[in-house]
Amino acid sequence: MPKVDSAALGKEPISKLLIQQSAPASIGILVMSLNILVDTIFVGNWIGSTAIAAINVVLPISFFIAALGMSIGIGGSSIISRALGANNHKKALKTFGNQISLTVLLTTSFVIAGLWFINDLIPAFGGKGDIFEPAKIYYRIVLYGVPILGLNMMGSNVIRAEGKPKFAMAAMIFPSIGNLIADYFFINVFDWGMAGAAWATTGSYFVCFLYIFWFFLSDNSELKIALHHFQLKLDILKEIASLGFVTLARQAVVSVTYLLMNNILYKLGGETSVTVYAIIARMLVFALFPVLGVTQGFLPIAGYNYGAKQPERVRETINKAILYASILALMVFSLIMFFPQEIVSVFTNDKSILKETPIAMRWVFAAVPIIALQLIGSAYFQAIGKAMPAFLLTLTRQGFFFIPLILILPKYFGILGVWISFPLADVISTIVTGFFLNREIRLHLKPSEMKSTSAKY
């Protein structure tokens, strides 16, 4: 891969940059989500449909801990992008060193707590009845590798902040391929069941870590940190925390959502409904990979040009990112609406699940064509370092709207109330985000405003 300097983010045409940044991010997310999807297919066909529900119970717990690394990575990467844009290399190095120290400390602490309360957490997240034992097996093994996963998520975001999306893509591809190969041998050949699925996942984290570790030691990275950069600095920690808290809060709400969904669905329809949601949750990640890729590609471009005080380029980045992501979202919507039965049949041959899932999936994806505005809008405030609006807009969909809806609507519409909560939350949160993004562009993306406020943020 040719060496790319981060300064290109402030010079190249925006359309070209968005493609350069988004395509690798999309491919990386595609491979990662394919990994999760195929992993689910393997588990469903080789172990059983209850195993799919078991993994769905465990993921929000382990991913919340790993999200500490993601939040530190995204929060610090916003600082790094703006620091590189302002030619402040010293601050970028200090930030990266602090990111590593903070990730190790926090993820390790939470893993210890997660293992200590294992018997309480699994039932709380819906791991009841036949789901409990396989969930416990999977949870314990996967949690061992979560600190490494946290470092991986942090590191891949820093790689993007340097303007090296192809390397970030590779960091997602290598472990995904390794996991699928390990899945085949550990589950199908060695017949290790849930333990095999868990060890395959944990092993993939270490593969990713080795690649990221190599990247930062090689000449491809501009961030050559020394031992003194690992020393925690309060001012940098505060800035990382204020921005990273947005991502952490989002994942916390996702975990709470899983908790509520699994328990509500278990009460309404038992293990079958929990399995239906598990399949749809994986399809949400898989099907939306191009939209999420554009959002990932958007972040370093917006952050760098904001730091470089180029408001016109920032405005163009916002407009084109929303346009491209919306077109991709419409394509995803069409695929789900026309082929839900065929998609579900790949996961299982259970007749009850095949009957219920396509209907639910259509409802869940009903408002997908408009979600680009919500994703790009909330990501913009995070990219430019405005933590509070980023935090509030991030919580609009699931925290402020979706959770209240799934608590209220099922009382009147039963299980249908759960599924129609998805598009209602998407529509309302998109309207709110659009209002605040439009106001921000009109009021603050002016040359005079950029000069006077960039130092503040």
Image (cartoon, grey):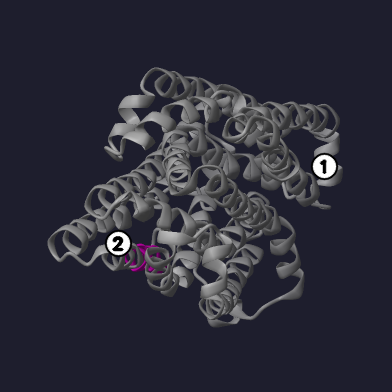
Of marks 1 and 2, the one in the foreground:
2
For image coordinates 29% across by 48% down, the residue present is 44
Whether residue 309 is visible to the viewer of this picture, yes or no, is no
Front residue of 15 and 433? 433
Label 2 Cα crowd, 10 Å radius (few <14 / some 14-19 / many 20+)? many
What percent of the width, then of the height, locates residue 406? 67, 40
Whether residue 27 is visible to the viewer of this picture, yes or no, is yes
Q: Main secondary structure of the magenta part?
A: helix
Front residue of 188 and 431? 188
Residue 360 in the magenta stretch? The answer is no
Q: Name the disc covering residue 451, or none.
A: 1
For image coordinates 42% across by 69% down, the residue present is 136
- From this view, report whether residue 424 is shown above or below residue 130: above
- From this view, report whether residue 152 is shown above or below residue 393: below
Query: Magenta residues?
Result: 205-218
For image coordinates 29% across by 33% down, the residue present is 345
Amino acid type, residue under disc 2 in the picture:
Ala
- From this view, report whether residue 99 is shown above or below residue 180: below
| Callout count | 2
What percent of the width, then of the height, locates residue 443? 86, 30
What percent of the width, then of the height, locates residue 169? 38, 48
Label 1 Cα crowd, 10 Å radius (few <14 / some 14-19 / many 20+)? some
Residue 211 in the magenta stretch? The answer is yes
What percent of the width, then of the height, locates residue 420? 61, 29
Sequence-first disc among 1 and 2: 2
Residue labelled with disc 2: 197
Q: Secondary structure at mark 2?
A: helix
Amino acid type, residue under disc 1 in the picture:
Lys
Q: Secondary structure at mark 1?
A: helix
For image coordinates 63% across by 70% down, the residue present is 94
